[in-house]
Amino acid sequence: MIKESSWFYVAYGLAEDKFKQYYHSYNQSYTDKAEQLRLENMEKFSLQSMDAKLWGILDKYVPEFAVEKKIVLPKLRSSFMQPISSGSSSLPKPTLGSSKTYKASVSPLPN
């Protein structure tokens, strides 16, 4: 807000006079101006003109849209990739430790 700004009040007498003037002297000039404004608004704010303006702005500020490029990945050597056969596995089977049972030793916390 601006420091110098303040509330404004409507001059009701002046507003009343303007409404009366408009009502009593209503003539073709008001409708002609309204029709001119309607035609101007239809021309400026139609879908086609707004579309043209939008594309003009996009062309100005976004010169080129993103382009999809293919990524070429290097081929992996076959020694790293060996197919896993479904029937037999060449991986060693995990062995369980000995059948001994282990007891956990608990030491008291130091003071």
Image: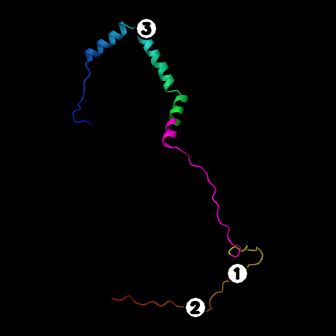
The part of the image, by quadrant, that contains residue 37 is: top left
Toward the viewer: 45 or 74?
Answer: 74
Mark 2 or mark 3, whichever is nearer to me = 3
- Can you identify the residue that label 2 sits on? 101
Label 2: state its secondary structure.
loop
Label 2 to label 3, Cα distance in Å?
A: 108 Å
Rendered residue at 49%/19% (across/down): 39
Label 3: state its secondary structure.
helix
Colour style of the rendered protein structure = rainbow
From the viewer's perspective, is 83 left or right of 102?
right
Identified by mark 3, the residue type is Gln
- Can you identify the residue that label 3 sits on? 28
- Residue 34 is tagged as none
Quadrant showing the C terminus: bottom left
Toward the viewer: 52 or 99?
Answer: 52
Label 1 to label 2, Cα distance in Å?
A: 28 Å
Chief secondary structure of the magenta portion: loop
Label 3 to label 1, Cα distance in Å?
A: 97 Å
The magenta span reads 56-79
Up-down: is 31 above or below 40? above
Q: Position of residue 48 (x, y in %)?
A: 55, 29
Q: Sequence-wise, which precedes: disc 1 or disc 2? A: 1
Identified by mark 1, the residue type is Leu
Residue most toward the left? 4
Rendered residue at 67%/70% (across/down): 76
Mark 1 or mark 2, whichever is nearer to me = 1
Q: Position of residue 93 (x, y in %)?
A: 69, 83
- Can you identify the residue that label 1 sits on? 91
